[in-house]
Image (spheres, grey):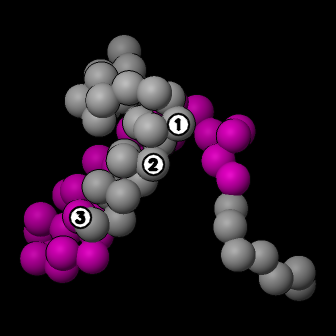
C-alpha cells in the first residue's frame, strides 16, 4: 500500500460532505469527545476558505 499524507476530496458530493459533517457533530455531542467537533470545525474552516466564503455560507451551500 502506498503511503500518503493528505487525501483530496474533489470527487465527494455536497450531500456526502454534509452527511460527514453532521455525523461528526452528532458523534461529538453524544460521545462528549471534543475531537469529533474539532475535526468538523477544521474541515468547515478549510473548505470555506477554499470557497472564499464564510463558514455559515458554506454550510448553507451544502444544504442547498
Q: Secondary structure at mark 3?
A: helix
Please say whether residue 20 is visible from this viewpoint: no
- Give the x, y percent position of residue 2: 88, 81
Q: Is residue 60 above or below residue 48?
A: above
Image side of residue 32 versus residue 23, left or right? left
Which residue is located at x 12 percent, y 68 percent? 30
Residues under numbered marks 3 and 1 in contact, where contact means CB atoms less than 8 Å apart: no
Q: Do labels 2 and 3 touch, CB within 8 Å? A: no
Image point (68%, 62%), residue name:
7
Mark 2 crowdedness (10 Å alpha carbons): few <14, some 14-19, many ≥20: few
Residue 10 screen position, x and y as percent: 69, 40
Do labels 2 and 1 touch, CB within 8 Å?
yes
Find numbered disc 2 in the image and state the secondary structure of the residue it sits on: helix
Comparing labels 3 and 1, the label whose residue is closer to the camera = 1
Q: Which mark is residue 37?
A: 3
Residue occupied by mark 1: 50
Quadrant where the image shows the C terminus: top left
Instruction: For marks 3 and 1, give the CA distance.
Output: 20 Å
**Quarter of image, res 3:** bottom right
Asked if residue 20 lies left or right of residue 56, the reply is: right
Residue denoted by label 2: 46
The magenta span reads 8-37
Amino acid at each position: 500500500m502506498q503511503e500518503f499524507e493528505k487525501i483530496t476530496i474533489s470527487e465527494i458530493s455536497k450531500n456526502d460532505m454534509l452527511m460527514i459533517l453532521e455525523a461528526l457533530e452528532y458523534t461529538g455531542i453524544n460521545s462528549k469527545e471534543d475531537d469529533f467537533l474539532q475535526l468538523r470545525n477544521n474541515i468547515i474552516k478549510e473548505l470555506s476558505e477554499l470557497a472564499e466564503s464564510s463558514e455559515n455560507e458554506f454550510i448553507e451551500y451544502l444544504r442547498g
